Structures are given as structure tokens and as C-alpha cells.
Amino acid sequence: MTSFYDTLETRAAAEREADLLQALPAQVAHARSQSAAFAEILAEINPAEITSRAALARLPVTRKHELHERQQAQRSQNAFGGFATIGYGARMPRVFASPGPIYEPEGIRRDYWRMARALYAAGFRAGELIHNCFSYHFVPAGSMMESGAHALGCTVFPGGTGQTEQQVQAMAELRPAGYIGTPSFLKLIVEKAREMQVPLPSVTKALLSAEAFPPSLRDWFAQQGITGYQCYGTADLGLIAYETEAREGLVLDEHVIVEIVRPGTGDPVPEGEVGELVVTTLNTDYPLIRFGTGDLSAILPGPCPTGRTNTRIKGWMGRADQTTKVRGMFVHPGQVAAIASRFPQVLRARLVVRGEMANDQMVLQVETTETSGGLATQLAEVAREITKLRSEVQLLAPGSLPNDGKVIEDARSYR
């Protein structure tokens, strides 16, 4: 099936990086001048200087909870918290709402959410009918996929969610080439079709998202004659990465700049280390600069075996916001990062909370080449200063901590 949506997918890696970095200063300048939120966030920034990843890494990360807070604070004046550069009318045909609520604009650009690329990688082609079972109300998922399918030249049946029997009937009569939606709902439809004794031979492929898609379920679909691929995106950013037939991670979209940072900070981690996905989009209507998704992932080495040359990520590996309550006090990853930042000899840090409820015990584990007791004492003092809580300190050899992106591990017993 290997073929490519466009020539961007097979550019030399150096050419792609140069193209992205060439576009970056103009996007930062646009966000700063046209978005009230980024005019404030980037007030001290000279966009012309943001020409490298190192320069980008010096900009502040805007996380989802901050976007939500700004929207709430400005709700009566600006529903989008000053992040959108377009307003109601011809340039914004739809507005969507994600839980929070967080409101997202949809612009008029063809394939606004850039989903056509993921659909193509999943095997969909022009002239096919696609059965779209993502929601069409409130959240943008249905529109995200439909607009991508239209850009690809496909016809869409807007199945939406629920009504499993009617979904089976429509599939049997319209004979779509494939399905778009969550993997769990596709499984329900296939099982309902079997119960109704209604064959669905036309449905041979699927693009799945919004839920985990384990290999066991992928294999189960294959046994039913359906080849399923997954993609990863958000309502704020659109497509971020997509799966290919190689089944080796997810390839990044061509129009985003992705960084992996240590949770609670904006500091990029070494390649291969698990951290939070931070994305800068080139969307001029909603120009999010260093947007923290709150999701964990890691960069995979080397290019995709299909010949696509863009960077690959492992996929969704959990949530980066590991804030937890200890003895009635909230402790968050940024505090752990603040502790570690005081000591250049600390390579990585992880706070482990143990014990039973009402008897919490904190252990700060740090990787370091220094083994003196003095360092442990100093770390304990700074940990108490920053968190207002006592913590034991363990000094570990470099490489001892798991590469799972956790900065705070809640290992308490709740029984």
C-alpha cells in the first residue's frame, strides 16, 4: 500500500527542518501581533530571533489549563481568550467546545485540521465512501475527519455516535469502504452486525483515534477483515501524528513543530526520553506557540520504513500532569523541576509518594554522579522549602530511573 499523500512526506530531513524553521519567525510574529493572548505571553520576545529549536525552547509553554483560564477570564469579551486571530463570520464557519469548556474556532482553509494525510496513510482514496462515527456536536472530531475526507475526495456518511443497529443497517446498504471513529465503537458495530447476521464485507479499513488501540484489538479487527490504523490529534491543534503500515510509531504531521519536554518545565529532553508533547502549529487562524498537550510520548530514532522521512513518536504514553495531593498539599511536576534546577549535578529527579492514606511519605529520587551525603541534605532542605513538605532523598546512579516520563509517582496504597 506504500505511497505518499504528497512530496512533503519524503523531503530530506534537513530540508523539512529548514522549511519549518524558516516559517517559525513569521508565525511567532503573527501570533504576537494578531492574537491578544500571545501579545501578552510573547511581549518580551523578538520574533525575528526565533530561528532555531534552541530559540523556540526559550519561549514559555502555554498549557491547556492556562488556555482554559484565559478563556474563562475573558468570556464576556472574547470566547477564545484572545488566542484566535479570526472572529465570527465568513472566516469562522463553526465553533466547537471541548470539555472545560474550551472553545475552538474552525477556519475556512481546505482540510483545516489536516486529517487528509492520516486518512491517506490508512488506505482511504478519492471516490470512496467513509462512515464517520465521530461526534458531530459540541466537539470538533466529526468535522475534523469529515473535512479531511472531503479534501481527499471522499464522500462521508455522518454516522455520529450511538444507534448501533442503525449504523449496521446504513453500512450494509451504503457499502462504505471504511470507518472513522473510536476503536471501541467499531468493535460494538462489528459485534452487533454479527448478532444481527448482517455481513459488512465492504468495510475493510479504519482510521481510529481518541482511545487506546492495543495490538490485541488491531489483530481482532484484522480477523474480521478490517485493517485499522490510528492517528493522534487534539481539538486545539488538529492532526499531530499518524500511523503507517510499518506499525512502528506515529509519523509527525508536516505542519507542526513538536518538542518533547520534561513535565512541569519547557526544557527539551534528550531524544528517546519520555516527556510531554509540546506543539507549535503553523495554523494562522489559531496560532498556538509551544502549546503543552499534557500528553506523554518519546521520539523514535530513524525514519519510518515506509520511506516517510519525518520524525516519529511512540504514540500516547500517558498524561504529563501528575499533580498529586500529599498531606493536604498539592505537589506538581514544576516543583520537582524547580528543586532539581538548583543543583547542576542532578541529572534527573522523580518524587515518589508512598505509604497509606493519611500517612504519606515523600522520597525524592535523583540521578547524580555525586554520592556525598551533603548533597542529599541540601536537596531535602530545598524540597521542603519549595513543597512545604518533608522528603527523604535517595541518590541514584545515572540511568537508574525508569524512562516513563513520570516526575511524580503516586505509589500509595488506597486499600
Image (cartoon, grey):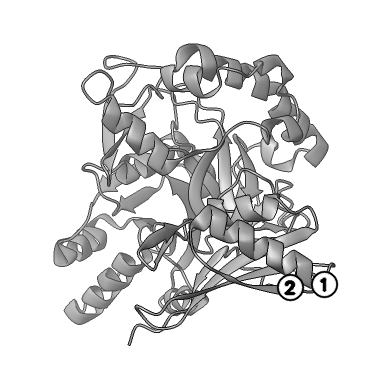
| Residue 276 appears in the rendering | yes
Left or right of 368 on screen, residue 246: left
Q: Residue furthest top?
A: 33
Q: Which residue is drawn at the image coordinates 68% and 41% (left, top)?
A: 9
From the viewer's side, name the closer residue of 414 and 157.
Answer: 414
From the viewer's side, name the closer residue of 316 and 45.
Answer: 45
Q: Position of residue 103 (x, y in %)?
A: 30, 34
For label 1, count other residues whose C-alpha is less than 10 Å away and answer few (under 14), some (14-19) or many (20+).
few
- Lower sequence index among marks 1 and 2: 1
Residue type pointed to by label 1: Thr
From the viewer's side, name the closer residue of 278 and 327.
Answer: 327
CB of mark 1 within 8 Å of CB of mark 2?
A: yes
Q: Position of residue 319 (x, y in %)?
A: 47, 59
Q: Which residue is drawn at the image coordinates 37% and 17% (left, top)?
A: 86
Q: Position of residue 154 (x, y in %)?
A: 40, 42
Image disc number at residue 93: none
Q: Which residue is mark 1?
A: 371
In the rendered image of this protein, does residue 55 appear above or below residue 326? above
For label 2, count other residues whose C-alpha is less than 10 Å away and answer few (under 14), some (14-19) or many (20+).
many
Left or right of 387 on screen, residue 77: left
Res 272 quadrant in image: bottom right
Q: Which residue is mark 2?
A: 395
Q: Position of residue 369 (x, y in %)?
A: 85, 67
